[in-house]
Amino acid sequence: MQSYTPPLGTGSTKDYDRAIRLWTREKRWRAAMLAALAPKAGETVVDVGCGTGSFALMLKQAEPRTQVIGLDPDAEALDIARHKAAVRRADIDWRQGFARDVAPGTADAVVSSLVLHQMPVREKAATLRAILRAMFAMLRPGGRLVIADYGRQQGFMRLAFRLTVQRLDGIDDTRPNADGVLPGLIAAAGFRHVAETFRLLTITGAIDLFTAHRPAQDHGLTVANDLG
């Protein structure tokens, strides 16, 4: 099975929600994600690496008529997500697994937050390519992608990133994100109109919001096999 890093890296998953709230100015970037997504009634949205379910629940509250699929390989995180959903009486389809486990053409939109920077370095390039291609495949033509994650880190943000995120998730595993590889990888997976639409400075580093679309018509589309 593909390896993965737990939500808080070497920290306890039980502390994840509190850590994200305290360290990342969570309300700001999650609100930006929701605004970029602009969910519509009747749509299916897959939250890849949903963790403890915070964004999936926020999305469901904003547009209850959206079908939300929360996907994560971590059983403990999903247990927390299910409990939070039960308290809020939110109907969300929680699934344990990876992006490749979602059937092609399932979603109108795919979201992911603070996941891609955690990929283990020994399989980083291949895994990122595979995840982004799986996201592309699960989207219907014209579907949209919204990713919030640590992007290029410069100056003081690089130091903040090293002292916080890289201590928990590992320096080698997280270096590609800090070097700014994500936009190129998203484009290489076949997405169009890749854009960085929002940047938030935090004590853990800069969190960027990336948006993109699967073309409405994929005639002759070829997907690059390198890191660009």
Image: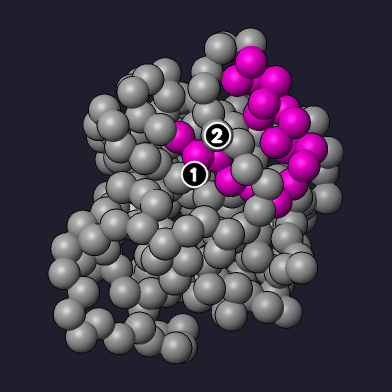
- Label 1 neighbourhood size at 10 Å, few (<14), some (14-19), many (20+)? many
- Label 2 neighbourhood size at 10 Å, few (<14), some (14-19), many (20+)? few
Query: Which stretch did the figure color magenta?
Result: 68-86
Q: Tell me residue 32's x, y (percent).
A: 34, 35
User: Amino acid type of disc 1?
Assistant: Asp
In the figure, is residue 146 to the left or right of 204?
A: left
Q: Residue under label 2, please give it.
A: 93
Name the one closer to the observer, 208 or 80: 80
Q: Are marks 2 and 1 in contact (CB under 8 Å)?
A: no
In the figure, is residue 198 to the left or right of 171?
A: left
* Residue name at image x 58 percent, y 53 percent: 115
Which corner quadrant of the image does residue 173 belong to?
A: bottom right
Position of 106 relative to 224 (above/below): above
User: Amino acid type of disc 2?
Assistant: Asp
Between the residue at mark 2 and the residue at mark 1, the CA separation in whole angstroms equals: 10 Å
Q: Tell me residue 68's x, y (percent).
A: 45, 35
Chain-order first, disc 2 or disc 1: 1
Name the one closer to the observer, 75 or 116: 75
Q: Residue under label 1, please give it.
A: 47
Q: Tell me residue 221's x, y (percent).
A: 25, 82
* Residue name at image x 26 percent, y 28 percent: 41
Would residue 149 be visible to someone looking at this image? yes
Q: Callout 2: helix, strand or loop?
A: strand
Q: Callout 1: helix, strand or loop?
A: strand
Q: Tell me residue 132's x, y (percent).
A: 46, 67
Q: Which mark is residue 115?
A: none
| Helix, strand or loop: magenta stretch | helix
* Residue name at image x 39 percent, y 41 percent: 45
